[in-house]
Amino acid sequence: MSVPTSRSLADWLSYIQAQHPSAIELGLERVRAVAEAMGLGKPARQVVTVGGTNGKGSTVAFLEAIARAGGWKVGAYTSPHLRRYNERVRIDGVEADDAALVEGFEAVEAARGHTPLTYFEYGTLAALWLFQRAGLDLAVLEVGLGGRLDAVNVIDPDVAVITTVDIDHTDWLGADREAIGKEKAGIARPWTPLVLGEVTAPSSVLGHAYAIGAAVIQLGNDFFHEAAEDGQWRWREVGTELLLPALPLDAPAQRANAATAIAALRALPEELPASAFAAGIAQARVPGRLQRLQRAGIEIRLDVGHNPQAARELAAFLDRHPARTLAVYAALSDKDAAGVATALAGRVARWFLAGLEPGTPRGQDADTLAARLAGTPAAAGERFAGIAEALHAALEAAAPGERVLVFGSFHTVAEALAVLDSGA
């Protein structure tokens, strides 16, 4: 496919999608070579890199909101997107427009020569190019896959964050938490802070940090969070306590994500004003994380969770907020669908299984999904060609006061939001 002659973002996205034979090819050599050719250095005065199995996007949202509340100019790079590619690159709270992204892709293309790059690598380099020109106080970079060999790891962070480690992407990262943790720990740097957002981090993470001299700051050991009165909560470390407002995000894990973001910001070389933490917590927003909508008295919850750990968080939410729940579920073919359904056992009254749109990378139809759910209650769920049909059927079957949960992947939530927004 020839280089686009137009400045259409859609044309460029089609072009970069076709430039590498593999959707995923981990490794830093190609990205580092192109970054050097582009003259890319540190994209901001300070950098936080966020890795982990679940909670990355929410933690980025808290980091971004708190830093901006403190008066910093912040760039945030996240993936994947829900509705528009532009969501992946934000500067000072505003999504990059089409023209800026095209300019970034053109800069990558001009520098890469014959070096093949994946879709994610193009996007990462374009984002870093835009950030470097924006005069940022802070860049927050979300790891796409793993950590050690992920494209964002071409940048040395001032603070690295690992939110959680659990089983996902086993074809690339390994079959157990220790192997996966070793890959994720690759974003740590010698003698710099490594913030861990769970109490029970794999020994591989701690061992790697010790071996390189990274300064571990761990939830449950170096910082803490706890409920307070009137829906508020406290963040604590030795000598410091912050009283914070109720979280704007509903999942039980969000308090740990917010606490982890606070620990990361406090570990940076530059200090934020104390008022920024409460203000930023109150302002943080991220779509598709138990996002709540209402239709004719029926509560709709949309969640991008796609692995057993995320499903356990969904189960905890459903236990805290009981209501008859009908689940619309569509998942990618490389996910542990049976593990997800098992984690939600006893909490879903009816399952509506859906296929993903034809052409979705690693997508599967409802019959294939049902076969992979064998042995779980979800296997007997009704099957539908697509999200729209499954969602309409679930809403038709639900009564006022009941809940429809739509989950399983970013693709699932994106398709459901398109249906709901259209009013179809």
Image: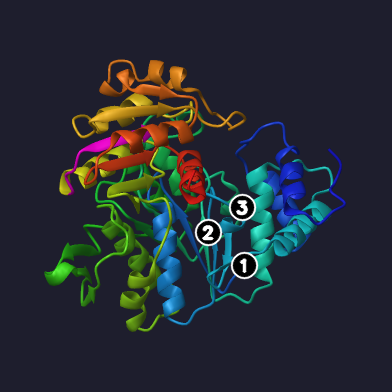
**For marks 2 and 1 on the same chain, the one whose residue lies earlier in the sequence:** 1
> Tag 3, which secondary structure?
helix
Given residues 423 and 349, the one toward you in this image is: 423
Residue 246: where, in percent of width, then height? 24, 68
Residue for badge 3:
85
Query: Does residue 374 show up magenta in the picture?
Result: no
Using the image, tell me which numbered label, if any, was put on residue 13. none
Q: Which residue is mark 1?
A: 43
Q: Residue placed at 36% from the left, 31% from the top?
A: 176
Looking at numbered disc 1 in the image, what kind of residue is underneath it? Pro
Task: Report which quarter residue 384 is drawn in.
Answer: top left
Query: Residue 171 location in percent, x, y?
Result: 49, 28
User: Element at badge 1?
Assistant: loop
Counting residues from the start of the chain, the first of labels 3 and 1 encountered is 1
Using the image as rendered, state which of residue 83 and residue 221 is in the foreground: 83
Residue segment shown in magenta: 321-329
Task: Kindly identify which numbered label has been placed on residue 141.
Answer: 2
Can residue 144 be seen here? The reply is yes
Q: Is residue 354 above or below residue 29?
A: above
Question: Is residue 326 rendered magenta in the image?
Answer: yes
C-alpha separation, residue under disc 2 versus residue under disc 1: 10 Å
In contact (CB < 8 Å): disc 3 and disc 1: no
Q: Is residue 363 above or below residue 133?
A: above
Residue drawn at (67%, 64%) of the image: 97
Q: Position of residue 408 (x, y in %)?
A: 40, 36
